[in-house]
Structure formats: C-alpha cells, structure tokens
Amino acid sequence: MAHQWDGFYAAYMTSTSGQGFGLFIFQNGTIVGADPMGVRFDGTFDEVLADGLFGTLKVTVPPNGTVIQGASSGPNGMSYDVDIAVEGGPTPDSVVRQETPLGPVNIKFELLRKLA
C-alpha cells in the first residue's frame, strides 16, 4: 500500500551544536537513511490519514563521531531510538522539531522524487 510520504528526501537538520544533512527513503512503512558522517537511520512508520506520520527510528552513529546535538559517540559508537511524530503530510518548506534522547533536532524534509 502506497503512502503519501513514499519517496526520496533530502533532510536538512540543525540542533544545539551544529547542522547536517542526510538522504532518506520512505517506502511502504519503512524509513532508511544516512548522512555524510556515516550515521545510519532505520525505522518504520504509519500514516494516520491527514493526521501525519508516526513511527520509530533507530539512529546508529559510528565510532568517534560527534552528532549535531553535541554528543560524542565514543570509541564503540552509539545508537538510540527516536519516536517520530510529524503532523500532517509532507509539505514544502515545513520544518519539523523532533525530540531525541540527545536533544531537539529541527528537520526540513525536501522531496527529491516520489516513488512510482
């Protein structure tokens, strides 16, 4: 079953200690993404009609990295889960504030291409 979020996205992210970007694919309830530092994103989502997108995302940071919230991943790397809640559908220029265990992140999703 296709979702209105299904597609390839650029994500522009800012937080308390920096900014970054990543690429994401949303397809049939699955989210997969990565950023240039090697952080990986893997999760699932559900859409509730016009209410939005809700799900869980596992964030995996490679060893000796520093995330945009300012935390270091240490010699063993780290991973943490984030509950996702995005009100409404994907709209151009909307910025989503996402709370994470390491602090808030503001994300602007830009649709690059819908999935056929």
Image (tube, rainbow, N blue to C red):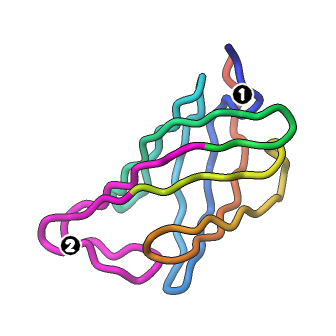
- Quadrant in the picture for the C terminus: top right
> Residue 103 in magenta?
no
Q: Which residue in the structure is indicated by mark 1?
A: 114
Quadrant hosting residue 99? bottom right
- Answer left or right for 20 relative to 65: right
Q: Residues within 10 Å of mark 1 (few under 14, many from 20)?
A: some
> Which residue type does callout 1 highlight?
Lys
Please state which amino acid type lies under the numbered disc 2: Asn
- Residue in view at x 67 percent, y 13 percent: 1
The region drawn magenta spans 55-80
Count residues near mark 2 (Cα–Cα under 10 Å), then give few for <14, some for 14-19, many for 20+.
few
Asked if residue 47 is positioned above or below residue 40 in the image, the reply reads: above
Numbered tag placed on residue 64 in the rendering: 2
In the drawing, does residue 69 fall left or right of residue 73?
right
Q: Position of residue 52 (x, y in %)?
A: 77, 43
Measured Cα–Cα span from mark 1 to mark 2: 35 Å
